Structures are given as C-alpha cells and as structure tokens.
C-alpha cells in the first residue's frame, strides 16, 4: 500500500534520503543523480530516487514548517529510511557567519510546536554525530565560503506578530542560525530510529526578514549549490562506510 | 516587487481569496473559475486568479501545517486580500458528524505552535461571523450531507509520538473536528485586518489516523466537492454584498 | 430542589437571561421589565424574572470576577437557560473607542484562571454569532455614541501587582477592551450548550485604573443605559426569531 | 475621596477587618458587634464597622472568587487596614476533618489565576503567624468540633469542566481543604504590608460538589458560628496585644 | 539498614536536626555540641550527633542546591527526624538588610526545579510557625546586628546565563533574600510530616554575585556565628517545649 | 584571586577536567594519576591535578544535583578549562542496558530547573561529538560489559513526591538512562565555550529507587571502574589530538 500522504510505494524508497523544503529544489537536486526517477508529486511532497557515487537515495521535498515536514519524515521512517540529511536555508544569528555561509547543525532549539506534541519539552533535538561529521568534512573540503558547526534554532513564525521572538537570547547562547524544520527532523529521527543531520545555507540576518528578505541572491544560490554537493557526498560516504561495516 | 515567497505581484491579487492546502487541489478549484490564470507555483504555494459569479478571487495553496500556511496568509494580507476562506479536510471528533460531513469553523482551538509566537496564549482564534454565516448558508443550501457549525481544533502533530494529544478533552468540550491550519488563519486575519472563515470536509475519525488513514475515499471526495462549491458561492455572495454596501 | 448557590427553583427560570455584575444594577434592569419579580438575593447573586417586548427573561447579577460569575453561569445552564447576554463595563485599549463607547464582544482573550480549570488552554472563548449580530444591530440602531464589534480581553487582576499585564500586546493585536467575566461566560456557554453574547460600556483607559478610576461618570452611565436597552431588545428579537423558527 | 468600588471613606475604616464572602453573612457578623453601623453596600461589597471586646473593626463581604475578593482586599489595604482575617467555608480533602470541622489556614495553594497576574508563580501565599496562632488558639478554646491547622488550596473552578482538578495530588501532599479566596488574600497582604489569616468551616467533601453540594446543613451552620466567634476573639486579642506593644 | 546516601543507621539519628550546606561548617557546628560524634561523611553529606543544652540533635551537611539537599532532607525524614532547621548564607534583596544581617525565613519562593517534580506548582513552601518564632526570638535575643523575618527565595542558578532572573519582581514583592535550598526543605517537610525553619546570614547584594562575590568577609562570618547560635538555642528550646508537652 | 567557591587558583587548573559527583570518588580517581596533588576541598568541591598518559588534567567533584554542580562547571570555565568529561552513575530506562552497563550520553533531557534559569526552554543540552566519540571508542575497547550511546535524562528529584515523573514517556522516546547533572554540564559548556561529554555506569532500574536502591553493588563498582578508565583514556587521546592539531 502506498504511503498515504507521499503517495509512493514504501518498497521504492532506499535507505538514504536527502530532504529539502522546496519541491522544485528537489527536482534540481534529482538532476544531479544518475538514473533519477520521479515517484510522486503529491501536495508539497515530491519524491525522486536515483544514485550518487554508487549510493541509492531518495530526494524528497517536505515543504515549509515543522508540522508539514513531520508528515514527510514520519512516512520516510515507515518506508524504511535509516539516514536522512536536510539541506535548506536559514537566517544568521551571528556576524561570524554572514549570508553565503554554511552551517552544519549539531542540535536544534525546539522553538516550534510540533515536537511538543510528540515528546515532553525537555527532550533534546540532536543530530547523529556520524552524519554531522560527514557533512562538516565534505562542506569544508568543498571550500568556497565559511562553514560553521553548532546549534541551530527551529521556529514556527517566519513573520513576527505582537510578541517578540527570543532571537537575542539564543544568539547570546551561541546559536548560529534560525530556520523552520530541523528540530522536527531530529526529534522524529530519535523516535523512529533514523540517523539525521542537516546543513543550511545562510540567506541573511534572521532579524531583517520582515523588511528586506531576499533569499534569491547570488551568494545564497551558490551556498545552496555547495550544501547540496556536500550533502550528496556525505550520503555517498556514509553509505560506503555502512556497506564496509556489514 | 514580488511577494518574496509566493512570487507574485501584489497588484495581481484580488480582495478575495480561497485557500486550500494542496497545490493540485488549487488547480482543480481554479478549473471552476472563469478566466482562470496561474500566477505562480513557488514551493507549495500555487496561485491562480479568476472570476466566479462575477467576483474576482485568488485561489492559493498554503501547504500542510500552520507555520508554512502562515507565510501564505501573511503575504496575502500584504497583497491586500481582505476576505479569506479556507477549504480543507479534517478528522471528526464526534459520531454526530461522520466522514463525508462538512463543518463550518466558528473558532479554532490553538493547539499549534505558530500562533504562540504571534500573540499571547489567551488570544482567541475566531472566524468572522459574516463569512461563517455565508459559508454555512451555502453549504446547507447545497444539501448532500450533514453540515455542522462550531469550534474546530488546529494541531501540529498529524502522527502521534510518546505523549497523548488531548483529543478526548476537546471532544468532551464540544469541538467538532481536528485539522492543521485554521487557528493560524484566524489569528493572522485578526492581526492583519482580514475577514476569515473555513469549511472542512471530514475524512474519518481523528483518532484512527495512525492506523488506517485514507483521505482518498469517495465519500470524502464528494464532500470536498461540496465544500469548494459552497466556498466559491460564499465568496461571490460576500463580494456582492460588499459591492452593494459601497 | 433549589439551585444551591442562586437559591432559586430551576423551573422559575426562563430560557433567556440577561446578566450583569452588580446586584443593584440587576434591580435597575428589572425595573424596565413588565411583571418583574425578584426570586432571590443570595450572596452577590440576585435573580429577577419578567417580560420585555413579549419575551420572558431572567435578570441575574453574577458579581465581580470570573470564578464567582462562573457559579452563576453554571447554575443558569442547569436551570435550562439557552441564551445569555452579559452587559457590563470595560476599560478601553484603543483611542478609537473612548469612554462612553459600546463594544460588542465577538470573542474573549482568556487571561483569567477560571477557564484554565475547565478546558485546555487553546480552547477559544467565542460568542454565538446570532447573539452578537442581534446585539450589534440593536446597539447601532439606538445611536448615541460609537459602537464597536471585536475581541475583548478578560483578566483576573483589576489592580496591578509586581508583574506587568500584557495590555500592550493585546492592544497591538487589535483587542478593543478589558473586563473581568466574558471569557468565563463564553467557555461555559460552549461547554453547556448555551448561546452567549456580551456588550460592554467603556469607562476609561484600561491602564489608568490604578490612578484615577471613576466608573461613575455621566458619560459612562449613559452608555450603560444604552447597552441595557440594546441587550433587552436583542433578547426580545432573538426570542421572536426562535419562536418563529419552531 | 471614597474608595471607588467599596464606596466608603478610607478614614471610616479601622485597622482591623474581618472579611467573608457573603454580604448577608457580613450583616449577621455585624450583629455581634457593639455600635455596628453599615457604611455601604456596593456590588457584593458590604461594609460594616463596630467594636468587639474593645477592638474597633470593619466587617466586609468580598464575594465569591479571588478576582472579585482581590478588589476588596486591595481597597482595604489602601484604606489603611493592617490586619485581616477571612472566615469562610471550604471543602474537605481528608477524612480526618469531616464537615463541621474548622481549619486555620497557614498557607494557601495558588490554584487560581488572580495571583499569577500579581506576582511570579513561585511566590508563597502565606498567612501571618501571629494571626494564625491567635485564630487557632481561640478556635481550640471554643471547643465544639475538630480544629485543624495547615495548608489550604484556593481554586477558581467551583464546578468542573472537561479537565481534572488536581485535588488528589494536593490531598496526598497534606492539603486540608479547598476554597476560593485565601491565596488572593495572603498574596495581597504580603504585597501591601498587611497581616492576614483565615479560618474555614468545612461543608463537605471537596469532590462531591458537582453532585450533592449542600452548604446549608446544620453542622456547617454551627461550625460557621464557631469560626466567626473565634475570628472576632482573635481580632480582639491581636488588637489588645498591639495596643500593649505601643 | 543504613540510609543509602547518608550512610548512617536511622536509629542513630535523633528527632532534631540542624542542617547546613557545607560539610566543613557542619564540623564547626558539631564542635559546639557536647558528646559530638561523627557518624559518616559520604559525598557532601556529613553527619554528626551530639547534645546542646540538653537536647540531642544531628548536625548534617546537605551540599549546594535543592536537588542534592533534597536527598539529605528525605533521608532525615525516613530516619525519623521531626524538626529541622537550616542555617545558611543568602544574598540580600533589600537595602534594609545589608550584608551581616540575619533573616528568618517564614516561607520560600519556589524558583527551583526540584519541588516542581514533587508537588504541583501552586503548593506553598512554608516554614513551621513554632520553629520560625523560636528562631526569630533567639536571633533577636542574641543581638549583634539586624534580624529580619519574612519571605526568602530559592533559586537554582547561582551564576546567570542568557535569561534574566526575576530578582527585581521578588524584591518589589517584599522578598528579603535569595538562596538555594529552603524551598526544598519546606516542601519536603510538608510532605513528610516534619517541622522546618531556616535562618540565613546575608553575604551581600544578590545581584552582584557574578562580579565581586566574596562570602568570606568578616561581617558575614560573624553573622554565621550568630545564626548557628540562634539555631542551636531554638532547637534546645523547641525540644524542651516538646518534652514539657508530653 | 581564588575561585570563590572551589577555592583554587585559576592558574593551577589545566585545560582538561574529569568531574564526578562524589569528593571521595574524586580522590580515588586522582589515585590513578601521576604527580597527583590535592588543591582544595571546599564544600563538596574537591580539586586534584595530575597527569594521565601525558595529559595534564584536573579531577574535581561537583556534588549531587545540577544547581550545585553548575557552580563547579562555571568556575572551571572561568579557570580556563576547555574540555570536561563527567563520570557518574545513572538509573536504567531500558532492559537492553541493565545494571553494570555503561552509557555514553550524546545529549540530555532537560528535566531540571537549573538550565531553565540559564537559557530558554527549547535550547538543546548536547555533548561535543569529538568527546562523545572518544569516550565511546575507549569504553568499547575496554570491554567487560555492554556499552550504549544515546540520550540520557537529567532530573532534579531523586525520591518522588505526589506527582509522577515522566520516566515512561522518555523510555518510550528511547532515552537510555536517568541521572542528575549532565544537562547542566552540557548547557553550561555550550554557553561558556567548553567541549563536554559524559559517561555513566548504570546502577539499577530508574523506577525502583524509592524501594531498594543500592548503588554499592559489585557489578556497579566494576562498571564505575571501567568508566573512569575510559574517561581518563579519552582525555589523554583528546589532549594528544589537540596537541597534534596545534
């Protein structure tokens, strides 16, 4: 039976998955695979499979925000995926890493509502260290811009309302970047026995979103290219290591 | 300048909007309009404009979950939309309204994280009564199945984790249905000066989602058809009343 | 058996009730009824019955604050009341509606403790739209001062302590007025199957209460007269519509 | 200028006050004073002054529930009251103290919303020990039934909704009784520099309120008589000690 | 069987205990007893027994912080201790009581995590009034510096992070001092049927801890001497009163 | 100037520290070092320095519970420590890892109050991956019993009160063990720029603590020996890698 939301057969999904928010970015990433094939495009969830450096993987879009992305992550887990890497964009919380930098997320602040409905509030949203190390190593090896490694924050609100978001407190606590889905990925991965990691390209200062947000600049586009490359290489390297370990 | 996420020119967006989660459902709804035209398909946000019974409106998909849908609602507000109606599917909390029923949502339980980052927790997520009355009147007039009117609940989690969701408490409190975006719509509409309403087609019992969820059944498809019809007629009737009032 | 707190026989209570905080205001309101009769004056709960424009109704005082008022609303529900309208005074949160204005409350911010012990925190405190429309129509028809319609906030604290009340955030979110019982009324009405609405006369700026609060000014007294008149007419009109619908 | 809600001149209020919920009970208590005089009956707030065993005191009713009672306590503080004792009724949490027992409250569980808007949640609602000791000594000396001393709990909800009240947890933690205003009294007394204490007559099991609540039984009435007597004597004894200390 | 953490035989523990944070201070206090004997020094828990003015008591160190101190208090309760007094140091929240003053704690703000895992958040952390009165009387009788009586606050954080501690709000609410274990003592005493009290020597302004904290000044050392003397005398006096009452 | 609580000169503290709860265990660990020297024993904080396989390190006891341990961790950071490893004991949450197993903690559930006063609640308490990998590798290499790697939980309450601890929810979420200080260590390390890791020896089922807790069994003692050995080797290996990287 097909997965009810992704509309793909579980058996068609490999053990490794690369996920991103945008269905059209998923298509671009799939363009880098050998034998790429689109399995479904249902709601915002677009699923491709193919090979990269010998590793079979799925490329799947999860849409914007943790609740919708969670549906994707849960169905991937049910389909048997064991390793997931998210690539995405994020706002910067520190001048040390300006737009165009890459950040490998070691753990995520849970400033979203989805994970509160899955686990008690004290539970850590934490990446798998082997995935993190592979992502960081590949991103650094690629060069082309600053690469950081550290804690990122996942929020639900992109535009602000009448209450302040605690960006300052998190910046003071050393959090590097703000985005909208990583905490969901890490908590679901912990619950369902998957290894997860994430790398984000910074598209500007997290606190100027309301005014002059432009995620379509050149420097951001290039960083996105680099993170995709790093993520694909990380999956290939993890798959090779897994195969060697068997 | 184009809206940064929807990628449409604000000036191209009419005062009325019909929103739904699924970009492919948006396409089907647009098929019911005269002079329908697709403006953009960016991420999960697909935007059409056209006319229905003399009223110009946009049909826009907002994706799954409140944080992603909020981006859509906020940009529609910035584009000048003054009346928004959401059509969608929801799980039933009461045997009185089984799968295939329609529910017009008068207000929404805020069991999601997005609105907590916009307004303090006590703020009510409430529909506009004129929109609600128009939706209810049109849905009842269409016939074809039960139509309820009352409070619905918006949750972030679709699949459950290790903590229980308070479905039972809300069912005892008279909440009729559970879905994932209405609270975001109502709170943002209050903040940005829009009138909002929502109608949902019930696709089964809210508590059996994890086991045998199938939103693709015939009875649900027919209810979705009816709610789309009711929503389009409601918009036409509200637009006519607004025009008469000027 | 008499209701344990109100000390009246349930059978003596009609389907419609007008409630206000002050037992002496209840007496004045009862003076506007035909065949008015005082049933009880127990604690702060004073109960009258009578007729207005053909409709039989009770006029009952509920005292100051949600916990005490809740006792009144719950016993009225047990006595079979199906429609309740509260008239009261409130502090203004916006210069658009100064002292002497009337506000019809469509929904209430739950900044009080009582409803947290009845329903989970996300539950909306929302008026019945038919009652709201009747109140608004009658208040506008009466003229004599500005009439607003929108969200009001219910707080527990009248005088402030050492923590700030979030009046500013709610004002920015478009909340029109602050008082002490409407959220309790709306939540209990939802739980017990009653229709409820509320209209309040503004008696000054919500944030100057600690300094120069004077709810006994002329302009306020006149607004209270108008809201009582509007509420009585709304009940008569709702009762007539209900009778016609049977 | 008169106190805005109690409608009495501050100068007419003595340093000692006995407060109770019910304006008609206040009248009965005033009947036990020499030179009793009614100053005002505004809303649920009825104010008497008189003398008992040489001590001048006010007897004031505060109505049902913490938010309304807080208005009374705050205005008494502004009028210069330095010592307040509350007499009231409460539900029992332990078979050790059945209906008809008296409990002197040493501190109160803050299960109400009012004090959360005055002080941070960790602040203790605690009686003055001299007042507590005087109340306990006088109540024991009067005889006629069991007298306990310990922690009581203040709740906002009298009738229950769809969420459970944590009566069991508090009973296990040794809390003796449940009522609706003491936490407000103790916190406000701490903030405004008053000494406060409270004694309650148990009127039945706290958990049978919804079914067969009857606070009008003989055994309860007798306990109320005893607590009033004990409270008056405690005030007289405290006033005598204060006078001696000057 | 020995207590698992304190590593002493329950039978060796008398009914009265004096507790302090520091195992080396416990040793100094034991030096003031007749027939002092060290029973154990396990982790930070050092236990002595001896006599003071005819009363047999234990002197036990509980370490820094509520969670660790709670282990000590719980095992003392299991060993049969019925009366516990804590002596310690605290930061001042008011210029009225500068460094070198003594404060007898009547109740404690629960700004620590330990008691939240024992009792619901509204539960008051309150001293026994007989213990409090004995401590206050003895401290005042000793002279040598200011002695206050009132509410103290128990926090978990000694050094601050990126969020502000609500010292100001508590200072405005009249809280006199800040330390790290009293709330744990009072809540556990309530749960386990012990009488508890506490006296603290102020070692400086609570808000300068991060900069120039020096708890080793002369004026503080003298105040600590006085509070130990007062606590020992209070225990002796309570024990004498208990013996007389039997 | 000496550190105010640890009472040691910052200059005497090396870059690497091994911390444990018990001052007497710290002494035993110091016995395994070359040139071991005791710097101070102040309160529960006992500090040794020495060498292990060429690496200079401090061995410091932090006492029981996060608030007290935090004081130690903060002062170590101020003294310039850059790498900290905690060894300790913990209760098991899964039959997969019974008493005598070792768990390397990758991240910690924040069920304690201390970190809530340092950072907002969503912040993750996460280990440094290099430290974690070194600890895991050394522990596995030592053999002698099961070695797990995963999330642990930090609680404040050792003995339970009247509210249930959410052990079951965390066990279902895959948490391996329960102890009392790791979350404090990880959060403070993130705030102060230290690398941190932790390894714990399981001393029994986390839920039988109240009944038959015995942390002094042979199998536990042997596991503690192994974790100390693993931690010392991990520090030596990290120090060697750091030296090589310079």
Image (cartoon, coloured by chain):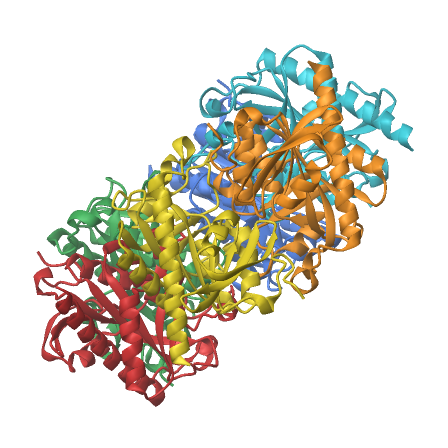
Chain colours: A cyan, B blue, C green, D red, E yellow, F orange
* Nearer to me, D73 or B178: D73
Q: Residue at x 82, y 23 (%)?
A: A237
Horizontally, residue C129 falls left or right of residue A177, namely left
Q: Residue at x 58, y 17 (%)?
A: A216
Q: Position of residue B163 (x, y in %)?
A: 64, 53
Horizontally, residue A104 falls left or right of residue C143, namely right
* Nearer to me, F151 or E229: E229
Residue A97 vertical placement versus D21 (above, below):
above
Q: Position of residue C36 (x, y in %)?
A: 21, 76
Q: Dividing the picture into quarters, in which one does residue B171 lie?
A: bottom right
Residue E129 vertical placement versus C6 (above, below):
above
Q: Position of residue C242 (x, y in %)?
A: 39, 67
Numbered-mark total: 0
Residue C234 is at least partly visible in this image: no
Residue F119 vertical placement versus E187 (above, below):
above
Horizontally, residue E170 falls left or right of residue B34, namely left
**Quadrant the C terminus of chain F occupies:** top right
Residue F77 is at least partly visible in this image: yes
* Nearer to me, C142 or E223: E223
Horizontally, residue A220 falls left or right of residue E150, namely right
Residue C166 vertical placement versus B79 (above, below):
below
Q: Position of residue B106 (x, y in %)?
A: 47, 52
């Amino acid at each position: 039976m097909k997965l009810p939301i992704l509309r793909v057969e579980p058996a068609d999904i490999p053990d490794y998955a690369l996920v991103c928010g945008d269905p059209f970015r998923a298509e671009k990433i799939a363009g880098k695979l050998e034998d790429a094939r689109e399995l479904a495009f249902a709601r915002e969830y677009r699923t491709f499979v193919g090979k990269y450096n010998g590793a079979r993987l799925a490329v799947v879009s999860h849409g914007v925000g943790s609740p919708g992305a969670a549906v994707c992550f849960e169905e991937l887990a049910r389909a048997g995926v064991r390793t997931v890497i998210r690539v995405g964009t994020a706002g910067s919380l520190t001048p040390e890493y300006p737009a165009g930098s890459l950040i490998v997320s070691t753990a995520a602040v849970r400033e979203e509502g989805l994970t509160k409905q899955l686990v008690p509030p004290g539970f850590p949203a934490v990446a798998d260290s082997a995935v993190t190390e592979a992502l960081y190593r590949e991103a650094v090896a690629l060069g082309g811009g600053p690469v950081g490694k550290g804690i990122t924050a996942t929020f639900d609100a992109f535009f602000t309302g009448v209450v302040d978001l605690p960006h300052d407190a998190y910046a003071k606590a050393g959090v590097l970047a703000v985005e909208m889905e990583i905490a969901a990925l890490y908590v679901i991965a912990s619950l369902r026995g998957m290894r997860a990691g994430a790398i984000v390209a910074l598209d500007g200062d997290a606190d100027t979103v309301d005014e002059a947000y432009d995620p379509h600049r050149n420097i951001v586009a290039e960083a996105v290219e680099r993170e995709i490359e790093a993520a694909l290489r990380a999956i290939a390297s993890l798959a090779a290591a897994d195969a060697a370990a068997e």
